[in-house]
Amino acid sequence: MKKPTWRKPSGAPVSCTEKIKVLNENYDELRALAQEALDDALLMGCSEAQIRKILRQMIDDLSTSYNELPE
């Protein structure tokens, strides 16, 4: 799967190699965990639509203690 192009609030791409590496590692870890949760839910007889909805809602409910960095 192709990794996203990480962008700044302005829409410009993030260019720092180390930042991109960390963001890609986080993406891979979260994707693997979400895949495992989806597979487990289906194996336990849960609705695929429901687990997808719950995972989306979980992301939407996240909050941050930080403001976006100015450019």
Image (cartoon, rainbow, N blue to C red):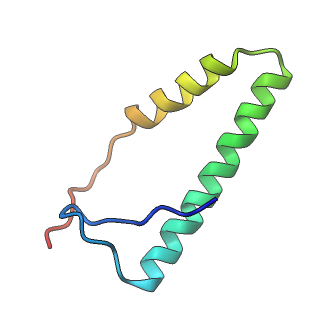
Q: Picture coordinates of residue 69 (x, y %)?
A: 20, 66
- The quadrant holding residue 28 is bottom right
The residue at the point 64 percent across, 59 percent down is 1
Q: What percent of the width, then of the height, locates residue 47?
A: 70, 15
- 65 relative position to 4: left or right: left
Report the residue at 55% width, 24% height from top: 54
Indicate whether 8 appears above or below 20.
above
Side of 18 where 31 appears, left or right: right
Q: Say which residue appears at 45% left-offset and 37% top-offset.
A: 59
Q: Position of residue 33 (x, y in %)?
A: 68, 46
Q: Residue at x 47, y 61 (%)?
A: 4
Total marks shown come to 0
**Is residue 3 shown left or right of residue 12?**
right
Instruction: In the displayed orientation, state which residue is furthest to the left.
Output: 70
Residue 44, located in which quarter of the rendered image?
top right
Task: Looking at this view, name the residue that lies furthest to the front.
Answer: 2
Residue 34: quadrant of the picture = top right
Q: Quadrant of the C terminus?
A: bottom left
- Give the percent coordinates (x, y) of residue 8: 26, 66
**Seen from this angle, which residue lies furthest right?**
43
